[in-house]
Amino acid sequence: MALFQATYHGKLDTKNRVSVPAPYRTQLKLGSANAPLPANAATPLVIRPSHRHPCLEVWTERDFAALAAPLEKLDPFSVEYEDLSLTLFGDAEPMEADKEGRIVLPAKLIEHAELDQSRQISFAGHFRTFQIWDSALLAQRKLAANKATNERDLLRARVIT
């Protein structure tokens, strides 16, 4: 299973491309725990706007499909199905990195994440996914996350069992 960790920095070029950090490209090649990718295979990605923050979430296609699997248990005519499927899929963009590890970000995703060619962007590890942020906004988010983690004592409480 791919595990994304650390923060890397880069730039958005004039063609709206970003270069996925080499350690993340290595992780992407691992595929999911159940199905590693064959050598030299392209890595299908899904990029979507975060529904909580001004950033982009980058998923492997396989992990995104696993995220959406609970939809199959819902009535396709229900309000819950409609809301969840639109939230997950409505603005998601499937894509693959080129040979140099670059991806082209659509204008609507750039706008959502407040990315700008004149400012640094950051790639932040997020367990099975990674996020793309404006670097200044990520710095603010990290401070808020650390403060909330400490206030709720999440590390010591071992919320995950």
Image: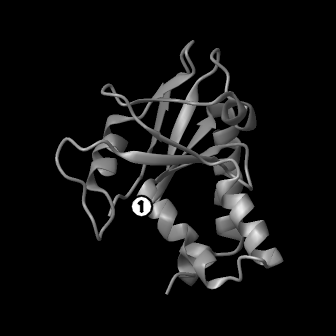
Q: Is residue 61 above or below residue 80?
A: above
Quarter of the rendering containing residue 132: top right
In the orientation shown, which residue stands out farthest toward the bottom?
161
| Residue 135 or residue 148, whichever sits in front | 135
Q: In this view, does 103 lie to the left or right of 135?
A: left
Q: Position of residue 93 (x, y in %)?
A: 58, 43
Numbered disc 1: secondary structure: helix
| Residue 53 or residue 70, whichever sits in front | 70
Q: In this view, does 31 lie above or below 40?
A: below
Q: So how many labels did they put on this image? A: 1
Quarter of the rendering containing residue 114: top right
Q: Residue at x 49, y 87 (%)?
A: 161
Residue 149 in view, yes or no: yes
Q: Which color scheme did the rendering employ for the protein?
A: one colour
Q: Name which residue type carries label 1.
A: Arg
Q: How crowded is mark 1: few (under 14 residues within 10 Å), some or many (20 or more)?
A: some
| Residue 69 or residue 24, whichever sits in front | 69
In the orientation shown, which residue stands out farthest toward the left?
39
Q: Residue at x 27, y 65 (%)?
A: 35
Q: Where is residue 66 in the image (x, y as percent from the top left)?
A: 48, 69
Residue denoted by label 1: 62
Q: Where is residue 59 in the image (x, y as percent from the top left)?
A: 49, 53
The image quadrant where one finds the N terminus is bottom left
Residue 147 in view, yes or no: no
Q: Which residue is drawn at 57% across and 12% down?
A: 14
Q: Position of residue 58 (x, y in %)?
A: 52, 48
Q: Is residue 48 above or below residue 107?
A: below
In the orientation shown, which residue stands out farthest toward the front?
77
